Amino acid sequence: MKAIIKYISSIFKALKSLFRGMAVTGHYISHPKEIITQQYPENRETLKMFDMFRGEVVLTHNERNEHRCTGCSACEVACPNGSIEIISKRIEMPDGKKKKVIDKFVYHLSMCTFCNLCILSCPTDAIKMSQDFEHAVFDRSQLTKVLNKTGSKLMEGVR
Amino acid sequence: MAETHINTISGKPLESQEYLINMGPQHPSTHGVLRLLLTLDGEIIHKVEPHLGYIHRSIEKMCEKDSYTQIVHLTDRMDYLSSHMNNEAVSLAVEQGLELEMPERVKVIRTIISELTRLSSHQLWWGVFGMDLGAITTFLYGFRDREMIIDIFEETCGARLTMNYNVPGGLMFDIHPNFQKRTKAFVAHFKQKLPEYDQLLTGNVIFELRTKGVGILSKEDAISYGVTGPSGRASGFSNDVRKHNPYSAYSQVEFKEALSEEGDSYARYKVRIQEMWESLSIIEQLIDNIPEGDYKAKTKAVIKLPKGEYYQKVETARGEFGVYIISEGGKSPYRLKFRSPGFSNLSALDHMAKGAKIGDLVVIMSTLDLVIPDIDR
Ligand code: SF4
Ligand code: SF4
C-alpha cells in the first residue's frame, strides 16, 4: 500500500516539475517585450557594432587621399601569422634624395586572427580596426586586400 | 559478460559478442571533433577510447617561434570559452619571469573579467547540457544571458570570444567607461534569471532521472586522474586554484569553493550552478572598488625572459590550466608546455562510463564540460 502511495505521489511530483518549467516558457509567451531576439539582416541599417570591435585592419586615409604609413614594417613583424606584407619602393624626391615609401600594404584577411597586435605596434597610428563584420565572399582571393588606395601618398609631417 | 541466446529454429546457442562503434568525430554531443571508439555489449559500454588529433594545431610548437606577446593570442584558441583565463596564465608566467608586480587596477580588472568569463562559460555549458538531454529551450536561455557578458567584452576589448585582452605586463587597453555600468546591470539581471535555470532544469523529473547516480567518480579517482575544476570538486576534491594558490585579486575577495560529495552528473551540475552564484558575488565585491592607476606596467618592447623555468596555474572554467615556460634567455621560449584541464578530465571518461548506457555517455561527457581544442592543441 505504502509503495503505491509513494508511486502515485511521485507521478504528481514529476508532473509538477514539468509544469514548473513550462511556467517559465509561458511567462515569456505572455511577455513579448522581454524577448531580445534581433532580426538580422533586416536590422542591418540600425545594427551598429561597438567602436572597439575588431572587424578588419584598415589603413586610414584622409580626404586628400593621404595615409600615415611610413612603411616601417613594425606591424609586419608584430603579426604572429604573416597576415601583413609591406612592399616598399624607393622614389626620388623633388630635392633629389631617395626615399622609401610603401608600394603595397597587403593584408590577408583570411589569415588574420584579430589579435590587435599590429595596431598596437604602429608608431604612427596609421592602421586601425574597422567595425565591418560581414566578411563572407565567394572566392578566397578576394580576402587578400591592398589597403593603400591607388594614388595615395604619405601625409605631410608623418615620419 | 556476453550472454548466450538460443536460436529458436535450430536450437543451437547463439553467441553474442562485443562490438565497436565510433562516436564522432562529427557527433553533435561531442561538441567538436572528438572521436570516441566505444566497445559495447548491446547498449552497455565496456570501454571508451578517445582518439585525438583531428584539431591538432601544434600550438606548443608554434609558441617556440613566437614572441611572448604573440603567444598570448594562441591560448585563446585552446579553451575558447575561458580565453581570458588562458591569456592571464601566460601573462602571469611571463610577469613572474620578469619579476613584475602588477598595478592593483590590473589585478582587479583581470579578476572581474575572469569571473565574467567563467559565468559566460557556465551559461553556455548549461544551455548545451540541456540540449544534449533533448531540451532545446535551455540553449536559448543560456545564450540570452551570455550575450550580455559578451557585449561587455566587445565594448571593452573589441573581441567577443578570442579576447587577447591580457598582455604580459598588464592589459591591452583600459576598460571602457561603460564597463562598470554594464557589469552591474548584468549582475542585477542575472541574479533574477539564475533561479529560472533551476526552475527549468534542476527540479525537472526527466533531468533528475537522467543525471542522478550517472557517471559516478569517487574522490580518490578524481585525484588520481587529475580531474580538476567543477568536475573534480563535485567528487569532493578541493582543488580550486583561486583558493589554494590565489593569483591576481582573488586573495582580496571572499567566496566559497563549491564542493559536493556525490560525484555523479547531478553533483557536477549543482557545483556549476553554485559556482555561478559565487562568481556573481566576487564580481559584486570588486566592481565598485576598481582602484585608479595604470592599466599596464612598463615593459620593454621586446620581452626577453631570463634563463630559467616558470610555472603558473590559473583556474579556468574547466579546471586547472598551467603554463610551463623554459626560457634560454631569448625572446621566445625554448619550450612551452600547457597543462590543459580538458585533457585530464577526458582521461577519466573511460572509467566513469564503464557499465553505463550510450545515452548516459552523452550526459557524462556533457557534465565533464569538454572543449575539444583544449584537449587537442
Ligand atoms: S590583427 Fe593580429 S593577425 Fe591580424 S594582421 Fe594584425 S597582428 Fe596580424
Ligand atoms: S602601418 Fe604603421 S607599423 Fe605598419 S608599416 Fe605602416 S607605419 Fe609601420
Image: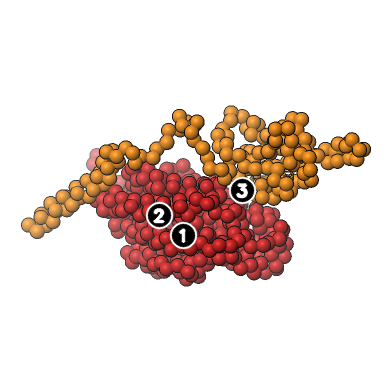
Within 8 Å of ligand 1, the CB of disc 3? Answer: yes
Disc 3 secondary structure class: loop
Q: Quadrant of residue B303?
A: bottom right
Residue at position x 62%, y 32% in the image: A140
Whether marks 2 and 1 lie on the same chain? yes
Q: Identify which amino acid the numbered label 2 is placed on.
A: Val
- Residue found at the very far right of the displayed protein: A96
Q: Residues within 10 Å of mark 1 (few under 14, many from 20)?
A: some
| Cα gap from disc 2 to disc 1, whole angstroms | 10 Å
Q: Residues within 10 Å of mark 3 (few under 14, many from 20)?
A: many
Q: Identify which amino acid the numbered label 3 is placed on.
A: Cys
- Specify the label residue A115 is tagged with: 3
Whether marks 2 and 3 lie on the same chain? no
Residue at position x 54%, y 54% in the image: B175
Q: Residues within 10 Å of mark 2 (few under 14, many from 20)?
A: some
- Specify the label residue B287 is tagged with: 1
Disc 1 secondary structure class: helix
Number of callouts in the render?
3
Q: Colour of chain B?
A: red
